């Protein structure tokens, strides 16, 4: 008899911890979850604000790692930025409000592209992680950005102009009831990027709490990366 997907559901995947060394000498901890068969693509997850509890296990990313390799064939790479702690351990260094985290993002991209050799790699940022993506995820080999609840807190107009000039797609998932940037303002501020597509999510909030919100986020990610694997199941 089928059972509903729950917050604690963990589906089959190959899961391995890893460490990264940044160009400025910090050691970052992370985990990669890869599909057992039929890979379709990959995401590199940039987590929410560490000083507000954000980390690689922030719930959307943990559930993505627990589900998407099996449901959609998507490899999920998560890591803690400098000074951030999760069950996997603590990355060395000190939080720098998105400045020195440039080295963290670049190290993670090298791991995904050079060490793992991932193809069809997309960068998924959430909150603070969206600013990291816009500012620092500029390796030409990934496919584009998927931004969850972007606050545009530290990104400058020049960062948005970079992505306009770059031409790769930038998708934003903007909650109707977001605490920082709601759809009308988000549409105005991202208008500089010609290849931007905003997905406004009615009734959603910044943290995407609740199984319907999680399912919507994971479904939108899958729609971009592996649309043939939709709809994602709600039961197993």
Image (cartoon, rainbow, N blue to C red):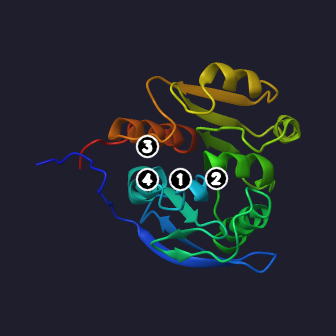
Dot 2 corresponds to which residue?
120
Q: Earlier in the sequence, mark 3 or mark 1?
A: 1
Q: From this viewpoint, is residue 64 visible?
A: yes
Q: Earlier in the sequence, mark 4 or mark 2?
A: 4
Using the image, tell me which numbered label, if any, was put on residue 59. Answer: 4
**Residue 194 figure quarter:** top right
Instruction: Select label 4 or label 3 by which is in front.
Output: 4
- Residue linked to disc 1: 40
Looking at marks 2 and 1 on the same chain, the residue that comes earlier in the sequence is marked by 1
SS at circle 2: loop
Mark 1 lies on a secondary structure that is: loop
Residue plotted at (79% across, 49% down): 135
Examine the rendered structure and indicate whether residue 142 appears above or below residue 146.
below
Residue at far top of view = 184
Q: Residues within 10 Å of mark 3 (few under 14, many from 20)?
A: some
Sooner in the amino-acid sequence: mark 4 or mark 1: 1
Is the C-beta separation of discs 2 and 1 under 8 Å?
yes
Of residue 194 and residue 229, the one placed in the foreground of this image is 194
In this picture, is 179 found above or below 12?
Answer: above
Secondary element at tag 3:
helix
Q: Is residue 213 left or right of residue 118?
A: left
Q: How many neighbours does mark 4 have within 10 angstroms: few (below 14), some (14-19), or many (20 or more)?
A: some
- Real-space Cα separation, disc 3 to disc 1, in angstroms: 9 Å
Q: For the residue labelled by badge 4, is the local secondary structure a helix, a strand or a loop?
A: helix
Compared across the picture, whether 206 is left or right of 209 comes to right
Circles 4, 3 touching at the beta carbon (< 8 Å): no
Say which residue label 3 marks.
Answer: 229
**Looking at the rendering, which quadrant does residue 154 occupy?**
top right
In the figure, 60 relative to 21: above or below?
above
Residue 65 location, x and y as percent?
Answer: 45, 59
């Amino acid at each position: 008899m089928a059972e509903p997907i729950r917050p604690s559901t963990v589906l089959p995947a190959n899961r391995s911890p890893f460490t990264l060394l940044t160009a400025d000498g910090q050691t970052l901890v992370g985990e990669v979850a890869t599909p057992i068969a039929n890979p379709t693509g990959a995401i590199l997850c940039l987590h929410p604000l560490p000083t507000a509890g954000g980390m690689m296990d922030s719930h959307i990313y943990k559930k993505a790692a627990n589900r998407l390799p099996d449901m959609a064939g998507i490899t999920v790479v998560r890591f803690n930025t400098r000074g951030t702690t999760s069950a996997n351990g603590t990355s060395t260094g000190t939080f720098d409000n998105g400045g020195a985290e440039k080295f963290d993002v670049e190290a993670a991209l090298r791991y995904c592209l050079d060490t793992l050799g991932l193809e069809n790699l997309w960068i998924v940022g959430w909150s603070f992680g969206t600013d990291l993506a816009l500012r620092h995820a500029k390796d030409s080999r990934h496919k584009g950005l998927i931004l969850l609840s972007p606050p545009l807190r530290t990104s400058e107009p020049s960062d948005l102009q970079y992505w306009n000039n770059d031409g790769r797609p930038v998708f934003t998932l903007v909650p109707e009831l977001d605490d920082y940037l709601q759809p009308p303002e988000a549409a105005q501020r991202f208008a500089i990027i010609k290849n931007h597509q905003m997905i406004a999510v009615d009734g959603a909030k910044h943290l995407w709490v609740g199984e319907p919100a999680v399912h919507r986020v994971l479904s939108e990610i899958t729609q971009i990366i592996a649309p043939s694997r939709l709809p994602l199941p709600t039961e197993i």
